[in-house]
Image (cartoon, rainbow, N blue to C red):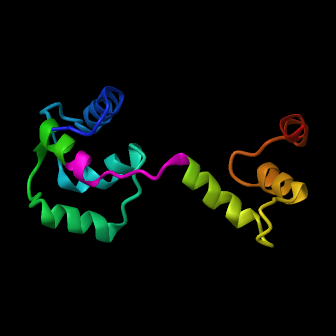
Amino acid sequence: MGKDLSAEQVSSMKEAFTLFDTDGDGKIAPTELGILMRSLGGNPTQAQLKSIIDQEKLNSSFDFPRFMDLMSKHLKPEPFDRQLRDAFKVLDKDGTGYVVVSDLRHILTSIGEKLEPTEFDEWIL
C-alpha cells in the first residue's frame, strides 16, 4: 500500500478520501473514483476510469487501503515542468522558443483567473 508515495501524498490522499466519504463509513463508491483522482492532480478520461474499474474489479465501495493501492498503480500526474512547457508551446505560434509579450498579456488579462493589466505589467518586468 502506497509503496511509491511520499508521506505528503498519503496525507493529501487521506484528506481527499475523507472528504468524499460523506457517510463516514470509511468507503467510497467506484463512481467517485474519477473526481477523487482529479482532485489529486490526475486527469483520467472516462475510458481510462472504466478500464481501471474493470481491471481492478471495483464493483462495490472500497476502503482507504484499497484506494491507496489504486492510486499507487494508476495515478500518474504529469510533472509540472512538462505541463508548463506544453502550455508555452501553445503560445509559441511560430515555434521559435519565444512567446510574444502582447500574446501573453492578452491571455493573462482576458482568460481564466484574469490579471489586471497593471498586475501583468508588474509581473512581466
Q: How many marks?
A: 0
Left or right: where does residue 77 sit relative to residue 82? left
Please give the name of the residue rendered at 56% of the width and 54% of the height, measured from the top-left corner: 82
Please give the name of the residue rendered at 81% of the width and 49% of the height, measured from the top-left corner: 109
Residue 52 in the image, given as x and y percentages of width and height: 21, 62
Splitting the image into 4 quarters, where does residue 104 fall? bottom right
In the rendered image, the vertical position of residue 92 relative to residue 69, given as above or below: below
Residue 84 in the image, given as x and y percentages of width and height: 62, 52
Within the magenta stretch, is there residue 26?
A: no
Q: Nearer the viewer, residue 111 or 24?
A: 111
User: What quarter of the picture does the C terminus occupy?
Assistant: top right
Residue 20 in the image, given as x and y percentages of width and height: 28, 39
Q: Nearer the viewer, residue 65 or 2?
A: 2
Please report the bounds of the magenta region as a residue range. 70-80
Left or right: where does residue 122 sit relative to residue 112? right
Within the magenta stretch, is there residue 72?
A: yes
In the rendered image, the vertical position of residue 85 relative to residue 122, given as above or below: below
